[in-house]
Image (cartoon, rainbow, N blue to C red):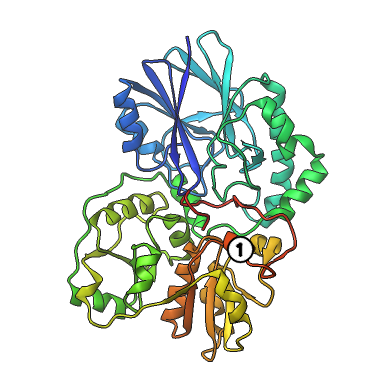
Amino acid sequence: MTIKVINIDTPTLGDRSYIAHDGKTALVVDPQRDIDRVEKVLADNSLELGAVVETHMHNDYVSGGLVLSRKYQAKYITSAEDPVAFERVAAHDLDEFSIGNFGVRALHTPGHTFTHLSYVLIDGQDKPAGIFTGGSMLHGSTGRPDLLGPDNATKLAQLQHGSAHRITDLLEDSSPIFPTHGFGSFCAATSTSGDSSTINDERKSNPALLLTVEQFVSETLAGLDAFPAYYKHMGPANLAGPGAIDLSELPRLSTDELLKRIAGDNWVVDLRDKDVWAKSHLLGTMNFGVSGSFATYLGWLFPYGKELVLMSNNASDFSLAQRELVRIGIDRPAASYLGEITDFSDLISTEVVEFKDVPGALTNSEIVVLDVRRNSEREASHIPGSKHIPLHELSDRMSELSKEKIYWVHCAGAYRASIATSIVQNAGFKVVLINESYDKALEVKGLVTTTGAIDHNPVAPSDIKAKN
């Protein structure tokens, strides 16, 4: 009997859920909160849900596991060591669970969290057929060990090294690994590689298997950069037991009502693409294009507890945004505005330039090139003379900007730069958007100083078509 494994990707968060099945009964691993995607796969393949397992209490998204398991009266399996507030099947190291004609064996693999479990997939002949590694062993990397705070990071990195070796010691070289993180997620300690991997592949490429524990801990901790602020809300939400989601249409605002929201203490987010937004928009709104890494960066900057209002000229943008937002625990924006920007009279625009224009700008004392990439990106390569403020620090560092200057803003793919441009513009500063991939800066002779290996696929969710 062959066990099939179906991937369910969430590229904007850099995560992957799985459905393993024997043709009749299914196991779901680490489902995202919008469980209708899982339900469609179950229905399309005429599968019964036998169990749902969580490798860990996730820090980068709210799980749909509890709701899914209850809806289908399936077993919900989580670590016995996690202090959850709901009934579940408690899993200990080496516990085995039957799902139809196959099963899984829990394997304690701490490192990403202290209670992390991987699940060895056992076929009908009681042979390992792969392993669901969650945030433990990733494709060419491991899960980051600092999400539980800096005081725990060293110990967790040491444990992560041991867990990687435990996994490879127990499984054959041909065994595939199925991680949840590592497809752009900030939960990865370092950049990952490839869409699939086996134990043998990891022996050849994974730092946890190639370095001594001392080297691994030192290099892993030294390479860590900031992670999204919204992560602090995810663990508690998952431990409490997330409820069902509501993706129904949001209340619609009139033009006057929208203007009142902008003038008030609301977060008004323009979902249109940055190219369209730059041509014409309302002062006081922020541009988070829904086609990019919307949830990651909005969640990173959004002050949870504020009222969120979405605006667009396309109703489908709201549906997509709502789905992205529930995954990070923003269950229900307050309202939405659907309409053309031409419905408003008091509009502004943002000048757009390219990197080929930057050398000339650097000779102008009134212009400051503002780099809003993360520290690790800056350290690898940057434009000499530019000012660096990571996007997630920008709102708290506005005092460093001058009303006498014009700020030309860039990032790696212009998505974050557009967000930053809207923030700087709303604060009353003069701003220009460098609306181009940083790769183009590398093509301008003498513009960039390279101090390290440039990572063209940084550990961050992306919109696939361009790095943000």
* Nearer to the camera, 438 or 142: 438
The answer to whether 299 appears left or right of 228 in the picture is left
Q: Quadrant of residue 243?
A: top left
The answer to whether 287 appears left or right of 174 in the picture is left
Q: Is residue 315 above or below residue 356?
A: above
Q: Is residue 232 above or below residue 210?
A: below
Coordinates of residue 189 in the picture (x, y in percent): 65, 48
Query: Mark 1 = which residue?
Result: 374
* Nearer to the camera, 223 or 402: 402
Coordinates of residue 8 in the picture (x, y in percent): 43, 35
Which amino acid is tagged 1? Answer: Arg
Coordinates of residue 190 in the picture (x, y in percent): 66, 48
SS assignment at label 1:
loop
Q: Work out which residue is located at the far bottom of the displayed protein and give it.
A: 404
Residue 253: in sight, yes or no? Answer: yes
Coordinates of residue 198 in the picture (x, y in percent): 63, 26
* Nearer to the camera, 182 or 289: 289
The answer to whether 299 appears left or right of 108 in the picture is left
Q: Quadrant of residue 298?
A: bottom left
- Counting every numbered tag in the picture gives 1
Label 1: few (<14), some (14–19) or many (≥20) C-alpha neighbours in 10 Å: some
Residue drawn where x is 38% and y is 45% of the image: 242
Residue drawn where x is 30% and y is 25% of the image: 44
Residue 162: in sight, yes or no? Answer: no
